[in-house]
Image (cartoon, rainbow, N blue to C red):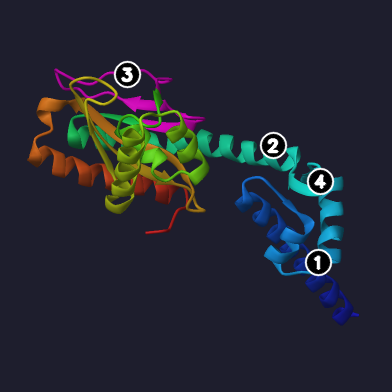
């Protein structure tokens, strides 16, 4: 009796594992795949893949998109959006104490940005108490290709997002310069800008990741350019990176 229960339990686990493999394959494709393509990616027979897809389709998890193509369904996309909204709801209260410490340490305004389409949106800021300070409001929108806050996001986004941003830029030399900039950001772990989004303003940004290692936001500081001399800049870079890593750890990220 117990053996049969164990077998059923194991089969259930294997079924769930296969279904997840299919969903991950579709997610990585960033579009749609044929049944045969899915079967190859998850290493199971097409007949089994077809049965899994039928069940997933009945529950709205996947959908048919013509000519035998399969893509993620609206229900899984709704779940993804709900998860994203939950992360962002958690993000501000988790980040705020760290941002306050960062502002105190650097004496510069700290900013938390998230991506929305081809833009970055400020969802929280902590203003510096310096006599001359950078000031902005929650809801400020910046294009993803301008400024340390935006580029710290774009550098860790998918190829599709980067391509969409590049397609709006001309000439080709501008695109090449941005790609080189993003590569440098990934290499060093932070972004630095001088007067890109706002004249006479310097900024330093670093990425924030969730428990899966997925980018969810950028943390940055901004202030007048004249204060960002070599000494202040180096100290501020270390402070921003450490603060961003603290937020990532609070979100469950352990990828150091």
In the rendering, which numbered label is found on residue 78? Answer: 2
Q: Earlier in the sequence, mark 3 or mark 2?
A: 2
For label 2, count other residues whose C-alpha is less than 10 Å away and answer few (under 14), some (14-19) or many (20+): few
Residue 165 lies in quadrant = top left
Q: How far apart in space, not on screen, are marks 4 and 3 (Cα)?
A: 50 Å
Q: Earlier in the sequence, mark 4 or mark 3?
A: 4
Q: Position of residue 215 (x, y in %)?
A: 46, 45
Residue 149 lies in quadrant = top left
Residue 41 lies in quadrant = bottom right
Q: Position of residue 113 (x, y in %)?
A: 40, 31
Q: Earlier in the sequence, mark 2 or mark 1?
A: 1
Placement of 68 over or under 50, stated as above or below: above
For label 1, count other residues whose C-alpha is less than 10 Å away and answer few (under 14), some (14-19) or many (20+): few
What residue would you read off at disc 3? 136
Q: Which image quarter is the C terminus in?
A: bottom left
What residue would you read off at disc 1? 12
SS at mark 2 in the image: helix
Q: Which residues are magenta?
A: 112-141
Q: Earlier in the sequence, mark 4 or mark 1?
A: 1
What residue would you read off at disc 4? 67
């Amino acid at each position: 009796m117990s053996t049969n229960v164990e077998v059923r339990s194991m089969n259930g686990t294997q079924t769930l594992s296969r279904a997840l493999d299919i969903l991950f394959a579709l997610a990585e494709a960033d579009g749609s795949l044929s049944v045969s393509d899915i079967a190859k990616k998850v290493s199971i027979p097409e007949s089994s893949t077809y049965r899994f897809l039928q069940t997933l389709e009945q529950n709205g998890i996947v959908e048919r998109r013509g000519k035998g193509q399969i893509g993620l369904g609206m229900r899984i996309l709704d779940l993804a959006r709900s998860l994203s909204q939950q992360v962002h709801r958690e993000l501000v209260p988790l980040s705020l104490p760290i941002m306050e410490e960062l502002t105190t340490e650097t004496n510069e305004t700290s900013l938390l940005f998230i991506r929305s389409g081809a833009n970055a949106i400020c969802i929280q800021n902590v203003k510096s108490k310096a006599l001359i300070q950078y000031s902005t409001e929650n809801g400020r929108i910046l294009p993803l290709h301008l400024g340390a806050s935006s580029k710290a996001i774009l550098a860790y986004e998918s190829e599709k997002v980067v391509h969409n941003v590049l397609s709006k830029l001309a000439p080709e030399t501008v695109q090449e310069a941005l790609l080189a900039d993003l590569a440098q950001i990934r290499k060093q772990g932070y972004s630095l800008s001088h007067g890109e989004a706002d004249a006479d303003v310097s900024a330093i940004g670093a990425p924030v990741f969730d428990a899966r290692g997925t980018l969810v936001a950028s943390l940055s500081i901004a202030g007048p350019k004249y204060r960002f001399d070599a000494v202040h800049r180096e100290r501020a870079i270390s402070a921003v990176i450490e603060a961003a890593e603290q937020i990532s750890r609070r979100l469950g990220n352990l990828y150091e």
